[in-house]
Image (cartoon, grey):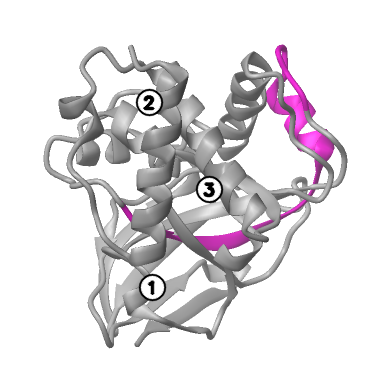
Amino acid sequence: MPDPSRIREIADELFAADRDRTTVPLLTARNPGMTVEDAYAVQREWAERRRSAGARLVGRKIGLTSKVMQVATGITEPDYGVIFDDMVFESGSVIEFDRFSNVRIEVELAFVLGTELEGPDCTIFDVLRATEYVVPALEVLNSHIELEGRTIVDTISDNAAMGAMVIGGRPVKVDDVDLRWVGALLSRNETIEESGVAGAVLGHPAMGVAWLANKLAQHGQSLGAGEIILAGSFTRPMWVERGDTVHADYHDLGSITCRFA
């Protein structure tokens, strides 16, 4: 189990990898016995370095909430990371491909909170009451740790592989649409690559947000009014190369487009 100084060293290593757009060897292979709690400690240290560098926290992401994502990664429990202001793009953006070490896209819904949300006993009903609106979003995955052989400990340490997000489409109130049946078609260069419905996220995407509030409570944290919560992907991650155009069609909720240059 790493001591506090080793936790700080790992956070420094990941901060440098983010800055230099590189990847590092598996943390778990170099730190036997490292636990999930150790990984969240690394993530918090890394996030503090980002804040000290001027980044502003605007939300959180939840990962690995759907069966398709757990199968794709070989990881069997959800995780979370933080979202900073420089990670958020609007639909239509041209995103710098070289900003990332690797690029994969996931299809999600983002919950924008109108009031604070806290655990430990948060339910789906608490989430729905606290949500101001829900909006389509894409997550850009970016790993600073080598992909082969990763465990959830590696992924959590690396801010749950959060690279960026793209928001677009039509914001809706939670009672204006059955969120379980919000579907999307994900295309790359005009070819449909993935599709899914939001109910694949724990049966209802708001369940992921409730899980997050309860998990944060274990770390003495809560979700604040105005935060953006990426609720988890309901498609497999789609690899993207330089020059690719990505389009996600959410039908009645509109669409999101971006290009990687």
Q: Which mark is residue 6?
A: 2
Residue in the picture at 84% in, 44% down:
225
Q: Are marks 3 and 1 in contact (CB under 8 Å)?
A: no
Observer-nearest of 109 and 223: 223
Q: Is residue 210 left or right of residue 103?
A: right
The part of the chain drawn in magenta is 118-143
Crowding at dot 1, Cα within 10 Å, few <14 / some 14-19 / many 20+, comes out as some
| Residue 106 visible in the current orientation | yes
Which quadrant of the structure image shows residue 86? bottom right
Residue in the picture at 30% in, 33% down:
154
Q: Please name which of the two marks, 2 or 1, marks the residue nearer to the observer.
A: 2
The mark nearer the N terminus, 3 or 1, is 1
Which quadrant of the structure image shows residue 254? bottom right
- The residue type indicated by label 1 comes to Arg
- Is residue 202 shown above or below 142? above
Q: CA distance from mark 3 to mark 1?
A: 34 Å
- The residue type indicated by label 2 comes to Arg
Crowding at dot 2, Cα within 10 Å, few <14 / some 14-19 / many 20+, comes out as few
Residue indicated by mark 3: 181
Q: Which mark is residue 99?
A: 1
